[in-house]
Amino acid sequence: MSKAISIPAFPVTPELRQRLINHLPKLQGKKILILGDVGLDEYVMGEVRRISPEAPVPVVEVDAEDLRLGLAANVAQNIRAMGGDPCLISVIGRDTGADLLKGLFSRTQVPTDNLVLDETRPTTRKARIMAKHHHIVRVDHETRRFLSPETEARVIERVEAEIKSCAAVIIEDYAKGFVTPTLFKSVVAIAHKNSKPVYVDPHQTRKGDDYSGCDLIKPNFDESVALSGLNADDLRHNPNKVVEVGQTLQKKTGAKQVVMTRGKDGMTIFSGDSMTQVPTFARQVFDVTGAGDTVIAALSLGLVSGLSLQEACVMANFAAGVVVAQVGCVPCTAAELAAAMADET
C-alpha cells in the first residue's frame, strides 16, 4: 500500500478573516467578462396536502411564484452583488423567457448590451415545482445544440470589443451548446493576446483536453474525475487518488491552477507543484443550486483584486456558505460576505 500523501491545510485565522473583510472594497468596479448560457429559473412554491384524483401525483397548492437569474446570469449577478462590474456575453431567443430575463437583469443592474439574439434558439428556462424546500419536478425549455457559425462569430466579435476593458474572463460551460470548440479556442487566444487570464467552470460531459489553454479550472470532484479520464473506482475516499486526479487535470488542460470543490470537504487547490486544502464554511445547507456560480464569481474577483489563490478560495468558500443556506439561485452580497467572515468562529 502506498504512503498517504498529506495535503497541507491553509490556516484560516481570525487575522486572515479580518484581512479579507478589509479587502472587500478592492472588489469594487473590477470588470469581469463572463461567457456562457444564460437562463431563467422559475419557482412555483406551495404545499402538498393531497394526491390528484386524475393520476397518482401530488397536488401542489401554490402559495408563491418567483423568477431568478440562472446559469451564467447568476455568475454575473453575483459579481455585481459583490461590487464587481459584470460584462456578460451570451445568446438569447426572441421569446417570453428573454423578456423576463431582461427585466431581472435591469433589477440586478447587469448590463444586457452584449446579449446576442438568435431567433433559432429558445431562451433557456427551468421551472421548479416545490413543496417547501423539496423539489417535486423540474420542467426545462432549452436546446443543447452548438451555436451556428454565424451566431458564434457575433459572440467572438463582442469578446474582441470588450476584452481590453476587462480584468479577466470567466467561461461557464453548461453543455447547452454555447461553448463550442471554436468559441473556446478563440476566446482563449483573444484573452491571452490581451494578457487577460481565463478562468473556466467546466462540464463533466467534456474531456480535459477540451479546456486546453485556460489558466484556472474550477471543477467539482465528479467533474474532475470525468475530465481526467481516470477510472472512478475507489477515487472518492482515497487521498492519493484525489491528488492524481488534480495533477492529471493540470496536465490535460495546461492550467497552472486547479480548484477542485469537494462539498463538505472544502476545496483542494493545485497551483503549480503545490497543493493546499481549504475548509468549507457552510453552517446549514438548504440548496446547492448556483453555489458553483457564486464560487467562480468570488474567486475571480478575489484574484483580480490582488488576493493570493488560497485567500481568494477562502473568500469564495465563505460566499458559497452564504448562498447554500438559501433556496435557489441567489447572489451573495458584499455585506453578507463580510458578515459571514466576521461571524465565523
Image (cartoon, helix red, strand yellow):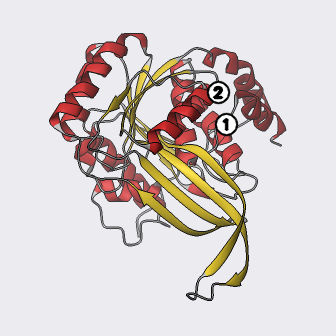
- Image quadrant holding the C terminus, namely top right
> Looking at the image, which residue is at 63% across and 29% down?
107
Q: Secondary structure at mark 2?
A: loop
**For residue 114, above or below residue 248:** above
Camera-nearest residue between 264 and 131? 131
User: Residue 192: image x %, image y %?
Assistant: 28, 19
Nearest the viewer among 180 and 14 is 180
> Disc 1 on helix, strand or loop?
loop
- Residue 289 can be seen in this image: no
Q: Which mark is residue 234?
A: none
Horizontal relation, residue 171 to residue 120: left or right: right
Q: Is residue 343 above or below residue 107?
A: below
The image shows residue 143 at horizontal and vertical percentages of 31, 53
User: In the orientation shown, which residue stands out farthest toward the left?
Assistant: 149
Q: Which amino acid lies under the numbered mark 1 shown in the image of this protein?
A: Cys
Residue named by callout 1: 332
Q: Residue at x 51, y 28 (%)?
A: 300
Q: Are marks 1 and 2 in contact (CB under 8 Å)?
A: yes
Q: Spot the residue most to the top.
A: 164
In-image side of 101 versus 201 (left or right): right
Q: Badge 2: few (under 14), some or many (20 or more) residues near its Cα, within 10 Å?
A: many
Residue corresponding to mark 2: 82
Percent x, y of residue 32: 47, 22
